[in-house]
Amino acid sequence: MKKIIFVIVALIFSGCDKPANNHFLTLDSVYLQLQTKQMLDSQDPGISKAKEEAMALIQRAQLYNYQLIDSRSLERAFDGFIVIATLPRGIYNLGLIPNAMHFEFTKSLSANTDGSEWNWKEDAKGQSKEKFLEFLGEDKNVKIVFYDEGEDIFAPAGSAHTAILWAQHEGYTNLYRLVGGFGAWKALGLKTTKEVPLCCQIDAHDSKTHHTGHTH
């Protein structure tokens, strides 16, 4: 029976999907298996890489005191979360998780010129901290999940990680990172949208107003 299961898993991981999708599917599967304490002794290099990445995500989340969530778990409990994409501006044209807000962060924390930490201007690409806090809301215990492309795990640690650290710095306590980011969500065939997110609807309106010379 175990041999049959292994063959099925191997066929899934070696299917005709794009290699990137296969990797995100493997990462998602391996993460879930680690959560249930299942043994992962496969010699498949793809599974070994995914295990290394999943362990890195788990260890970093433990070190920085936040939580992880997989895509299907987020889909089931979506209404209980504030969801924020930390992807580069403009990349939402390739798709976003429906109803997610967007606020770009760098893939790693930036130091100030004097070497000190918490360089908001660089980490948030010059965006307003007030807008970020508006997205997070007044409840410091609300569940907030951040997600990026899902490709940066080791160094840099990814823009979702940067966003979480800033949210913690502002006093928020119930923070999550989406395992595999948008890559895993999309590879699993979950719903996506190309609608312009809240941030950029505002920016587009302001830009149009600016160019037409109208003022409020």
Image (spheres, grey):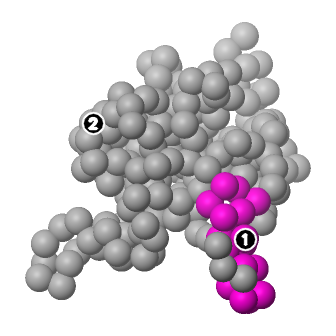
N-term mark: 2 or 1: 2
The residue that mark 2 highlights is 65
Query: What amino acid is found at the position of numbered circle 2 in the picture?
Result: Asn
Question: Left of 157 or right of it: where is 27?
Answer: right
Is residue 208 found inside the magenta-colored segment of the image? yes
**Prevailing secondary structure class for the magenta stretch in the rendered image:** helix
Question: Could one spot residue 9 in this view of the protein?
Answer: yes
Are the residues flagged by discs 2 and 1 in contact, CB closer than 8 Å?
no
Q: Position of residue 214 (x, y in %)?
A: 72, 82
Question: Could one spot residue 187 in this view of the protein?
Answer: no
Q: Please report the residue visible at 18 percent of the width from the left and 67 percent of the height from the top.
A: 117
Q: Position of residue 20 (x, y in %)?
A: 71, 57
Question: Left of 158 or right of it: where is 215?
Answer: right
Cα–Cα span, label 2 and label 1: 38 Å
The residue that mark 1 highlights is 205
Determine the image quadrant of residue 86: bottom right
Q: Please report the residue visible at 71 percent of the width from the left and 63 percent of the height from the top.
A: 201
The correct choice, above or below, for 4 with respect to 177 in the image is above
Q: Position of residue 26 (x, y in %)?
A: 64, 41
Magenta range: 196-213
Quadrant placement of the N terminus: top right
